[in-house]
Amino acid sequence: MIMPFKKIKTGDYVVAAGVLLLVGALLLINRYMMVLQPAGGHASVEVENEFVTDVSLQEGAPRYTPISLPRGEALLEVEEGKIRVLPMPREICPLNICSSVGWIDKPGQAIICLPNRMIITVSGEEEDPLDLDGVTN
Amino acid sequence: MQTKRLVNIALLLTFAVVIHTVESVIPVPLPVPGAKLGLANIITLLALYFYGLGSGMTVAILRSILGSIFAGQFLGYGFFFSLAGGILSTLVMAGFLYLEKRNKVSLISVSIVGAVSHNTAQVVTAAFLIGNYYLISMYLPLLLVLALPTGFFTGLAALYLRQALQRVIPETGSAGAGQEV
């Protein structure tokens, strides 16, 4: 019979600490890369798989953009480089998960409102969807 | 005795493949793809311990190949993740077994570093195949934190199993013992 905890040697704690250090280092790198990314320039809005509009996050902020949804209207608030969904009445968005996401500002970040099938995605300065020749679905 | 050695390694490989296959059917109660107990690692660890790096590597590689054939995923993404993880973790575990034989660490540590290196190789391979390098800094920490408890328990299991196997496989611990038996 082996008593498990008597088998643990001092070196084991060093190994465990080393693994935790590695995890910490990776998380720090992750954080650093997030900070390094430039803030997004645009946010594209899709409702029910249809492209609705492209909101600039730089010009004229702060401002509000209404988006019409099948069951009502959502209000997007834009501030310098960031965007969020304002809370909606319960009849339109029952759980308000989309508004509780809060501000998003980095390219690739998204707010998804599942009940209304609305997707807001931040994109960088360089990729402007309006530069495309055309979009086919 | 070469024959006994060969038979024992073949038996270890069989155990590894069976454990690998059974384990792939057990659902993991965590929403983390790629996370699993890694029980088959016990066998690789013991093959390394009793028969050295060459045999341990043989068991690890053949286990990945046979295991993925039985799971029906041969040459799929999962196969390459598992193969890369198996090769790297075997190398790293062989290094740590050297420390274990000098009483610096226990078999639990060897198992933990095996799990950690397996996950690392897996995620790095996945990042290369998929082309998303954020996977390494975002997903790997999660897997590594999980590798601590799973590595601990498989290490514990390896401790018990080694004790049992020492009665069957004579002359353990010293390098190259298998040959002279």
Image (cartoon, rainbow, N blue to C red):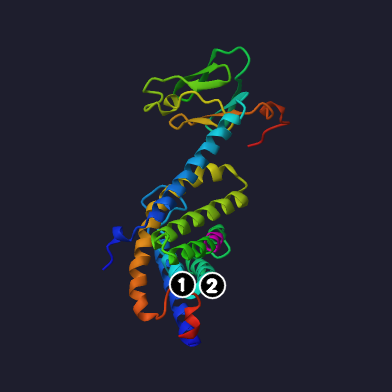
Q: Which residue is mark 1?
A: B47
A67 is within the stretch colored magenta: no
Please determine if labels 2 and 1 lie on a single subunit: yes
Element class at badge 2: helix
Question: Taking B4 as reference, is B165 above or below it?
Answer: above
The three-letter code of the residue at mark 2 reads Thr
Question: Taking B129 as reference, is A67 above or below it?
Answer: above
Q: Which residues fall within the magenta stretch?
A: B83-88
Q: Which chain contains the residue that carries disc 2?
A: B
What secondary structure predominates along the stretch shown in magenta? Answer: helix
Element class at badge 1: helix
B136 vs A9, left or right, is right
The location of residue A32, given as percent across then percent down, is 56, 33
Q: Which chain contains the residue that carries disc 1?
A: B
The location of residue A99, given as percent across then percent down, is 44, 24
Nearer the observer: mark 2 or 1; the answer is 1
The location of residue B137, given as percent across then percent down, is 54, 42
B84 is within the stretch colored magenta: yes
Mark 2 vs 1, N-terminal side: 1
Q: Which residue is mark 2?
A: B58
The three-letter code of the residue at mark 1 reads Ala
Neighbor class of circle 2 (other Cα within 10 Å; few <14, some 14-19, many 20+) is: some
Question: Taking B49 as reference, is A39 above or below it?
Answer: above
* Residue plotted at (40% across, 80% down): B169
* Residue plotted at (46% across, 62% down): B99
Question: Taking B29 as reference, is A67 above or below it?
Answer: above
Which mark, by number, is residue B105?
Answer: none
Q: CA distance from mark 2 to mark 1?
A: 9 Å
Badge 2 vs badge 1, beta-carbon distance below 8 Å: yes
B17 vs B167, left or right, is right
